[in-house]
Amino acid sequence: MDRPIRVLVSKPGLDGHDRGAKVIARALRDAGMEVIYTGLRQTPEQIVNAAIQEDVDVIATSILSGAHGTLLPKIAELLKEQGAEDILFIGGGVIPDEDIPELIESGVKAIFTPGTPTSETVEFIVNNVRK
Amino acid sequence: MDLLQGLKKGNKRAAAKLITMIENRTEGYQDVLKEIHKSSGKAYVIGITGPPGAGKSTLTDKLVKEIRKQDKKVAIIAIDPTSPFSGGSILGDRIRMNDLSLDPGVFIRSMGTRGHLGGLSVATKSAIKILDVYGAEYIFVETVGVGQSEIEIVKSADTTVMVMVPGLGDDIQAIKAGIMEIGDVFVINKADRDGANRTRAEIEMMLDFSNSEFKPAVKMAVAVDGKGINDIIDEIERHKEYLIKTDKYHHNRVTSAREEIVEIIKENITDKIFNDHLISSQLAELTQKVVKREIDPYTAGFNILKSIKL
Ligand SMILES: Nc1nc2c(ncn2[C@@H]2O[C@H](COP(=O)(O)OP(=O)(O)O)[C@@H](O)[C@H]2O)c(=O)[nH]1
Ligand SMILES: [Mg+2]
């Protein structure tokens, strides 16, 4: 019996919309993954602490607030500090195209902007998760 | 085996990786369990159980915050039922425990109910052992109080807190006496809602019929507002004192150690039998005969047993 891929789905930032995070959580569940859902308003510290304790394979964040420029690199930095860069860290949400290269540079493995079919995210995870 | 050294030093990453290893039954997991046994057995295990939505996670969050004031290290295992729709699941207990992920003295692990090779209760008991050696002085285990393996988990806790809500009415009648007997502390959560007193009276009445020596109290709580938390902690403490005073604490550990050994024997006998080629072909052959009514299942079963060499 293969163990399901474990994913932490989190919504960093201060705005109160978790629709995007819920959509992705459901899609990953339907693809057979074990989703640990932490809900709204997570700080990078909370996200990384949870990811370590849950020993997840993937961190999927959904962000709307425009604060992606600071929050996502901060998560990547904390993961490095913990020696946990092997966790596949991805982001989704309203992120302008011109900001993406810098985020990838900081350690985010992929960014999925609105309109990306969830199947694409699922496929990316399956193909890139640590074996 | 530096994960083991990390674990003994209280490293969270090591504890987390070892729990995964045990859940997946990765090669070498038995050696881990063998190795840590000596250093386990120190933590006090508290089961939090009750119907979905009763407020178990919210209550656990508040109880743990209170216990953390004594600066004791705490771990939480939150078991969420797996979605019946696909193999996947959404484990949402952490939503109610978000502040705790910033407390370095708290370790939270979520577990789904499916996909555990040796069964959920075996995986949970092993996770408890790991968190015990990690250094947690209290380990909370949250489960929905249904299903055989969940009842087994709850039975292995030192103290079990049964969380109810007002207006369960007929549901309470439907909760089997067996489950009522598992509770050591009863909590009517959401006491801000109508009917809390009536529900309390109903539960107290059911408890009156119990002939167990320890008489559980029924406490009111509003977990979201942190009301009633100290009362519940006092009751957990009273139950703990009772266990220790009457030597039941030791007795319970004898029972569960015995169960653990029996589990291991059962599991490995089954593995041995059904991984054996000769036995599988004999089984297939005899199955045909049973279907054709040439022999009966008892004769078939005992014939196979005779050819088993352990
Ligand atoms: N009114 C009221 N709601 C509560 C109380 N405790 C928890 N809740 C709410 O009940 C819902 C389920 O709580 P949760 O802790 O997730 O329940 P669990 O499924 O038993 O773990 C959440 O929306 C909580 O905010 C309470 O004392 N009163
Ligand atoms: Mg819960």
Image (spheres, grey):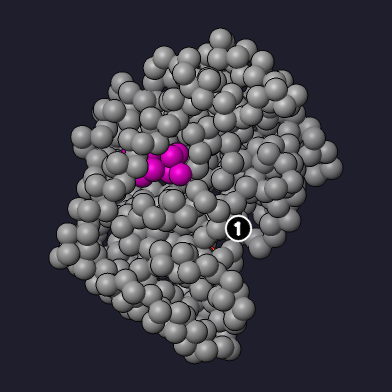
Furthest-top residue in this view: B278
Q: Amino acid at mark 1?
A: Leu
Q: Is residue B42 left or right of residue B145?
A: left
Residue A69: quadrant of the picture: top right
Rendering coords of residue B146 (x, y %): 55, 58
Q: Is residue A61 left or right of residue B293?
A: left
- Near-viewer residue (B100 or B55): B55
Q: Is residue A77 visible?
A: no
Please determine whether, in this image, residue A91 is positioned above or below residue B275. Answer: below
Q: Is residue A33 left or right of residue B98?
A: right
Please determine whether, in this image, residue B104 is positioned above or below residue B220. Answer: above
Q: Quadrant of the C terminus of chain B?
A: top left
Q: Is residue B31 magenta?
A: no
- Estimate how packed mark 1 is, as few (under 14), some (14 to 19) or many (20 or more) residues with alpha carbons within 10 Å: many
Rendering coords of residue A57 (x, y %): 56, 32
Q: Is residue B155 visible?
A: yes
Q: Residue at x 42, y 56 (%)?
A: B154
Q: Quadrant of the N terminus of chain B?
A: top left
Rendering coords of residue B42 (x, y %): 22, 48
Furthest-front residue in this view: B294
Q: What SS does tag 1 mark?
A: strand
Please determine whether, in this image, residue B161 is positioned above or below residue A94. Answer: below
Magenta-tinted stretch: B121-131
Please determine whether, in this image, residue A47 is positioned above or below residue A120. Answer: below
- Near-viewer residue (B35 or A15): B35
Q: Which residue is mark 1?
A: A40
